[in-house]
Every structure is written in structure tokens, then in C-alpha cells.
Amino acid sequence: MTESLSNSATPSHALYSTTLPGSAHWSLRVRRGMQLRFTDLDGGANLGLLMYNPEDLLERYNAPDTLKGQHTFKLTRGNCLYSDMGRVFASIVEDDFGWHDSVCGTLSEKALQEKYTARSYQDHHNQWTLSGEHSFLTELAKYGLTERDMAANLNLFSKVTTDNDGNLVFDSSAAKAGASLTLRFEMDTLVILNSCPHPLNPAKDYPMKPVGIEMLKAPPVPDDDYCKNFRPENIRAFENLSLIHISEPTRRS
């Protein structure tokens, strides 16, 4: 990955930036009050995302609660990403893609072997092909987590709809170079990422699509915040954060 650091703390300037190549994985701990901005650099990227509480790894992103609590199938600006303890990991504060898949899971090792020509690192180096399953498990192992800890994930920059028979359909036409999404983190979060293809992507050749990642300082969250007030359930999820924030030690700026 290519990386850069900045001393700027203004919301418009990234404190840190990197590019996650296609068929790659990464993880990092993001502090409360920070933002991550993801950009589909070439169009057609898929960014698999999992989230955990670094202080209690049993608390993790909960897809069913996130969707049913906000009465939605797709995720976009205004939506919050809930933990299984009813708290908000992150809020989608900016989004010009408009529809991110929340239900299709990740590309399994079996599907990779059946769908694409597998390329090993020994033979192809950085052009090797990875499954989302392998990528997630590799990152989870760094924190003592295993396959049993791999919850349902998000797929950013992938639009999935249904046809008249109720079948899930991947919308390749939604791909847009330069599309971006910004997450504002409402609590300390362990973020697990992979840039492997969406499991429903109909492409015959393995898509190697990079994603730009920038870390920014978030402005304070006002009472009339758009995400906080997007749904009544979001307000309650923010209220559930109050106890852990009260007990946090004071951090130096």
C-alpha cells in the first residue's frame, strides 16, 4: 500500500492516507471522533467491512439490527452502523455512491475457486487472487479471532437489488470512478477491510480494483446531527453510547 501522513488536523485534510490495492486486506483501530473516507478510485471496487469493539471483541457489527432498526435494505448517508449491543459504531456522514450492499456476505474460498482462475502469490506475487473469506480470517487472526467470530459484513461500492422473482441481482452499471463514502466513528472501533470482489459480481475475470482510504478528524456531533436524527432508533443507539463515553479516561489532544 502507498501511504502518506499529514500534520493537518482540519476536517478537509487527511491526517493519513493510503491505497488498498485490489485483492488485498488491512485492519486498523480507529478512535472515536475520527473519520475514514473511502474512494473507489477506478470504478467497480468492492470494499468488504467488519467492525469490532477493540475493548470487548465480543461486541461487533450487527447487520440485522442495523437494517431492521432503520427500516432499510440499502445503506447510504444518514444511516448508522449498529453493534450487537445497540450502540453506534459509525455514521455514514457523506456518500455519493448512494447504495451499499448489506446482505450478500463475502466471496468464499470455494466460490473463488469455482468462479475465477486462482493465482498463487508464489507465481503471481501482488497479482494473486484472494477470497474475502481468506482475507477476513487473516486479519481477524491478528487479534485472536477465528472463523466463529466472522459476522455478516458490509460491501461498500456494491449495489444489489432484487428482480421480480425476489432474486438478488448485482448492478454492475452502478460502478462509478471517484465515488466516495465517509464514516464518522462514534466509538473506538477495530476495522477489518478487504478489497476482494463482491460474491455476486458477474465479471469473468477477477476484478483488481483499488480503494483509497483517508483518515480525518471529525467535527463535534451537534444535537441536530443528520445521522443521529435520521431515525428515532439512531437517537437511542447514540444514547446507549453515553455510559462508555462517561467512563472513558480523558485523552490528551
Image (cartoon, helix red, strand yellow):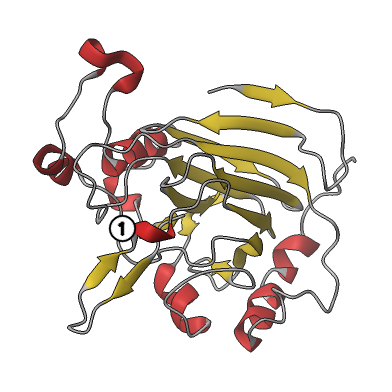
Residue 70, x across and y down, in percent: 53, 82
Residue at 45% x, 52% y is 50
Q: Is residue 54 visible?
A: no
Q: Name the residue nearer the viewer: 40 or 139.
A: 40
Residue at 52% x, 65% y is 83
Residue at 82% x, 46% y is 12
Placement of 185 over or under 143, stated as above or below: below
Callout 1 amino acid:
Gly
Left-right relation of 183 to 242 = left
Residue 82, x across and y down, in percent: 54, 68
Residue 213, x across and y down, in percent: 60, 39
Placement of 239 over or under 97, stated as above or below: below
Residue farthest front in this picture: 173
Q: Which residue is mark 1?
A: 105
Q: Name the residue nearer the viewer: 17 or 138.
A: 17
Left-right relation of 154 to 124 = right
Residue farthest left in this picture: 114
> Can you say which quadrant of the picture contains the C terminus?
top right
Tally of numbered tags? 1
Label 1: state its secondary structure: loop
Residue 89, x across and y down, in percent: 60, 61
Q: Name the residue nearer the viewer: 169 or 243.
A: 169
Mark 1 nearby-residue class (10 Å; few <14, some 14–19, many ≥20) = some
- Find residue 165 and report its image quarter: bottom left
Q: Is residue 122 visible?
A: yes
Placement of 209 over or under 239, stated as above or below: above
